[in-house]
Image: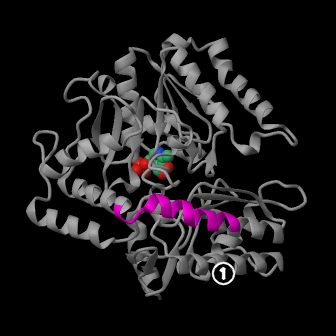
């Protein structure tokens, strides 16, 4: 029995099935930069970055040192009662990074999920309105509030309702909804009509507190909303006193080549959620908003025992240092261009590669049936499994979207090595040499 198997077998009886999306049966033992090593000593190039939670790479020395120094000083005292120095320094630094002009304030959380719950709380409190509008295909988290906002996986809501009331879902303008030959402007108009339909039929706009959107959907397939659509939604919100809120948990912290994905649209949110890579993957999140909104709730409406923990805050300070000092935004853009060129080339070679979307080092690559153009989930499972065997970690989103989100510190050499692995897997699929993993029925969302 391998060491991976031994550890997984020991864990299996005690771990709820609900706690993990299965892909590969390995145990991650260590990580460095853009590689991780499993319990049997095999090293992989990480094209997932812990679900975009380690943009600064695994165990970055500057982040590790900050964590070690802070842990030796004070591991935890609840920020719900007393301030700590790292979080007190981080709050203004992070608030200043937010793409919101004018005074901002923030509240801490432990996960992206609770940061999105906080958006619901603050939006309702500030506006005195009940409804929140979110989008199909969105993933906002797994707490009751954030999963009520989400619609990306049936298993996330199956058997656990009733969910939070007064959440309305409107269609996200993803490329799969575009009719063949439909020009962008016509597509945007059609999607905006679908967006407005609830408001014209049963949802009084003056009762809506916030519209929450991922400007680039992550788990929905790495999909950027058309700019014209975003502007129409934003203008609609502003015209109706509705707060415009964005979820930056997956796409923020430099992932797309900007600090925040909303900066691709030249729009300012009223509220935003941040998590994942904020503290290089340690449990820290934040809801950030215009100060008057963030002061609309009284203590202790959004306090948690461990949110704003000194060690996680020190990790976040160091994470921001690394993103700035190592110019990771520029790096995401530069390497993202290489990745886009690679996947576009492969698309010319292999007819099963459909749409390629790349925003910095942030990619979604559709795998389709060459004849029908429809999603090919079997080919996708074969591919990610072969890529794994060849030494890179990559998963799929939906049923057929390759998720390409390496740590932003990935080296040029590692990126080339990853391209070589991907090219080999694509070639083998084209030659019909790949088989399905034996656990195909249980992998994926
Ligand atoms: C866009 C987005 N929002 C929120 C979340 C939830 O974050 P967490 O898993 O830290 O609660 C995720 C997680 O994948 C996400 O991708």
Of residue 131 and residue 354, the one placed in the foreground of this image is: 354
The answer to whether 141 is drawn above or below residue 72 in the figure is: above
| Magenta-span inclusion, residue 80 | no
88 to the left or right of 29: left
Would residue 293 be visible to someone looking at this image? yes
Predominant SS of the magenta segment: helix
Quadrant of residue 38 in the image?
Answer: bottom left
- Residue 20 screen position, x and y as percent: 47, 60
- Count of residue discs: 1
Q: Identify which residue is drawn at 15% across, 64% down.
A: 71
Give the labeled residue for mark 1. 420
92 to the left or right of 384: left
- Residue at the right extreme, as displayed: 371
Work out which quarter of the rendered image holds the C terminus and state it.
Answer: bottom right
- Residue 166 screen position, x and y as percent: 50, 22
| Magenta-span inclusion, residue 335 | yes
In the rendered structure, which segment of residues is drawn in magenta? 325-341
- Residue 22 screen position, x and y as percent: 54, 64
Q: Identify which residue is drawn at 24% across, 48% down.
A: 90
């Amino acid at each position: 029995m391998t060491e991976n198997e031994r550890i997984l077998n020991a864990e299996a009886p005690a771990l709820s099935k609900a706690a993990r999306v299965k892909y590969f049966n390995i145990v991650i033992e260590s990580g460095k930069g853009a590689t991780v090593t499993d319990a049997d000593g095999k090293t992989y190039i990480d094209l997932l970055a812990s679900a975009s939670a380690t943009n600064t790479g695994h165990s970055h020395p500057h982040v590790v040192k900050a964590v070690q120094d802070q842990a030796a000083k004070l591991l935890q005292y609840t920020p719900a009662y007393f301030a700590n120095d790292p979080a007190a320094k981080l709050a203004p630094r992070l608030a200043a990074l937010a793409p919101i002009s004018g005074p901002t304030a923030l509240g801490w959380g432990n996960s992206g999920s609770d940061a999105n719950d906080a958006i619901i709380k603050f939006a309702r409190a500030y506006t005195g309105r009940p409804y929140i509008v979110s989008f199909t295909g969105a993933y906002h988290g797994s707490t009751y509030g954030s999963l009520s906002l989400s619609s990306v996986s049936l298993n996330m809501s199956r058997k656990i309702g009733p969910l939070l009331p007064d959440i309305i879902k409107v269609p996200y303008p993803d490329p799969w909804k575009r009719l063949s030959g439909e020009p962008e402007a016509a597509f945007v108009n059609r999607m905006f009509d679908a967006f407005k339909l609830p408001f014209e039929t049963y949802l009084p706009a003056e009762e809506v507190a916030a519209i929450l959107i991922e400007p680039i959907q992550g788990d929905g397939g790495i999909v950027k909303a058309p700019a014209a659509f975003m502007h129409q939604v934003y203008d609609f919100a502003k015209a109706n006193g509705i707060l415009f809120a964005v979820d930056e948990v997956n796409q923020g912290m430099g992932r797309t080549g900007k600090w925040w994905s909303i900066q691709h649209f030249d729009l300012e949110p009223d509220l935003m959620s941040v998590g994942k890579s904020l503290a290089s993957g340690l449990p820290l999140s934040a809801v950030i908003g215009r100060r008057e909104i963030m002061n609309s709730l009284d203590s202790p409406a959004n306090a948690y025992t461990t949110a704003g923990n000194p060690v996680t805050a020190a990790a976040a300070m160091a994470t921001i240092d690394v993103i700035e000092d190592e110019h990771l935004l520029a790096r995401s853009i530069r390497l993202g261009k290489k990745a886009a060129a690679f996947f576009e080339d492969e698309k010319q070679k292999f007819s099963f590669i459909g749409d390629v979307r790349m925003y910095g080092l942030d990619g979604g690559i559709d795998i389709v049936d060459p004849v029908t153009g429809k999603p090919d989930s079997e080919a996708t499972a074969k591919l990610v499994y072969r890529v794994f065997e060849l030494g890179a970690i990559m998963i799929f989103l939906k049923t057929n979207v390759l998720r390409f989100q390496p740590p932003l510190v990935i080296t040029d050499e590692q990126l080339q090595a990853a391209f070589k692995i991907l090219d080999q897997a694509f070639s083998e699929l084209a030659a019909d040499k790949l088989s399905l993993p034996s656990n195909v029925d249980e992998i994926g969302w």
